[in-house]
Image (cartoon, rainbow, N blue to C red):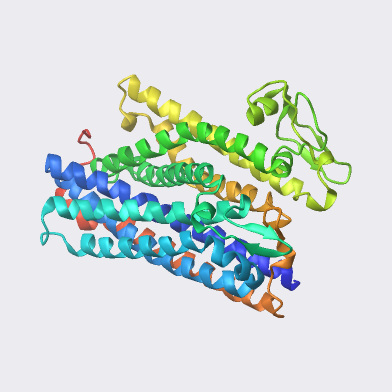
Amino acid sequence: MDDFLAARSQMALSLGFHIIYACIGMVMPFFMAVSHFKWLKTNNEVYKNLTKAWSKGVAIFFATGAVSGTMLSFELGLLWPNFMEHAGPIFGMPFSLEGTAFFIEAIALGFFLYGWDKLNKWFHWFTGVVVGVSGLASGILVVAANAWMNSPAGFDYVDGKYINIDPIAAMFNKAWFTQALHMCLAAFTATGFAVAGVHALMILRKQNQDFHYKAFKIAAVFATIGALLQPISGDISAKDVAQRQPAKLAAMEALYKTEKPAPLLIGGIVNEKKKEVNYAIEIPGALSFLAHGDFNAEVKGLDKIPENEHPPVAITHYAFQLMVGIGSFLVLLSLMYFFVLWRNKSVLNKRWLLKIFVFAIPLGYIALEAGWVVTEVGRQPWIIYGIMRTKDAVTPMPGIAWSFYLFTAIYASLSVIVIALLYRQIKMVPTLYSGSIKSPTTKAN
């Protein structure tokens, strides 16, 4: 493995792991806060026990997210020193603010975990809310930094020098809102379906149904609302990409030739040598509408873009198709869930629906990873879009491949530990909280 490939692979691996830990850490505190609020309002001990169970999961993912995030910050300097030399002073503000949000989150989490029966009950609940808000703010700030790489702003680039730096303009670049919105909805959707699916599995196994059904309902509401809003966010993002990064849009749709109107492709096998897509289903004019809001608008293809600025088309296209396909499935599942509720049917009696939720446990995260592949691979060959190429930013240090192998081992070990801890936590639920859980035959509220 050459050093350039090793550096990119290590960064991809690190981001791939961290994004899951980070998204769970961003979203789970809100589940915890809702459950806690329900306990304070109803005095139902099941909600108190559920809050305590979820708070342990929040603590696990806070710790793993902190570790993986710290590793990423070191990797930026280790693997991409040329990038950080020039970009650091420009987009450093969101990273600094993210550090502040992280410390607020850590302090609030400490108050929440050790504040049971010691703090005012509503102040205690408020500290849990602060954990969620500060975690969400951390995610938005990091995404703002990534958005800057896709939409550079806040400086002038003259004769190879970065001058007239404005960190505020850099942070609030043209891509930050669309990327942050899409990412936050994806985090709630993916984590919501994963958590709801785990509790659905426990319901199907008839283990502490009241406990798990209450947990399922909270997670399912976040998941389904997020899934239904995601297509709106996707439409906003697509129109934004069409304006700023036409090469990325062309790669997403494997559009090799400029067309007016341009069809939307569903599926298909990309032949990069012949520059064509085979066996795809075409929806006439749909890409024109998606990109420009006009079914007859022209969409720029890769033929209008220099060859040395083409992203890897096949990878970007397949990742985009996977993201959209899974997203569409989760929208359909959300509609089925609300239809069942609208018909006043108990989800406990719809085993087929619970089984679909179990099937959906990993799907949101697969779509999340695919979306990041589209964002990062679709930007290539640029690390700062239109300014600096990725190959010019990589470290000159030889032997970086060994670092890749080391970090791979660390992340694999970390993942095994997290899975083991979560499995142990789930298995301990009946033991820890059985004293206040209704029997499996009791109808859930």
Q: Position of residue 433 (x, y in %)?
A: 20, 53
Give the residue at the far bottom of this rendering: 398
- Quarter placement of the C terminus: top left
Whether residue 421 can be seen here: no
Q: Position of residue 198 (x, y in %)?
A: 39, 47
Return the residue nearer the eye: 387 or 316.
387
Q: Quadrant of residue 383?
A: bottom right
- Quarter placement of the N terminus: bottom right
Vertical relation: 56 (above or below) 303: below
Q: Position of residue 125 (x, y in %)?
A: 19, 51
Q: Quadrant of residue 134?
A: bottom left
Return the residue nearer the eye: 367 or 185.
185
Vertical relation: 6 (above or below) 148: below
Return the residue nearer the eye: 348 or 272.
272
Residue drawn at x 24%, y 45% as measured from the top left: 35
Give the residue at the far front of this rendering: 164
Vertical relation: 396 (above or below) 95: below
Whether residue 317 can be seen here: yes
Residue drawn at x 44%, y 26% as measured from the top left: 335
Return the residue nearer the eye: 217 or 157.
157
- Is residue 314 toward the left or the right of residue 179 in the image? right
- Is residue 266 toward the left or the right of residue 189 in the image? right
Residue drawn at x 77%, y 39% as measured from the top left: 269
Q: Position of residue 165 (x, y in %)?
A: 56, 60
- Is residue 88 toward the left or the right of residue 348 in the image? right
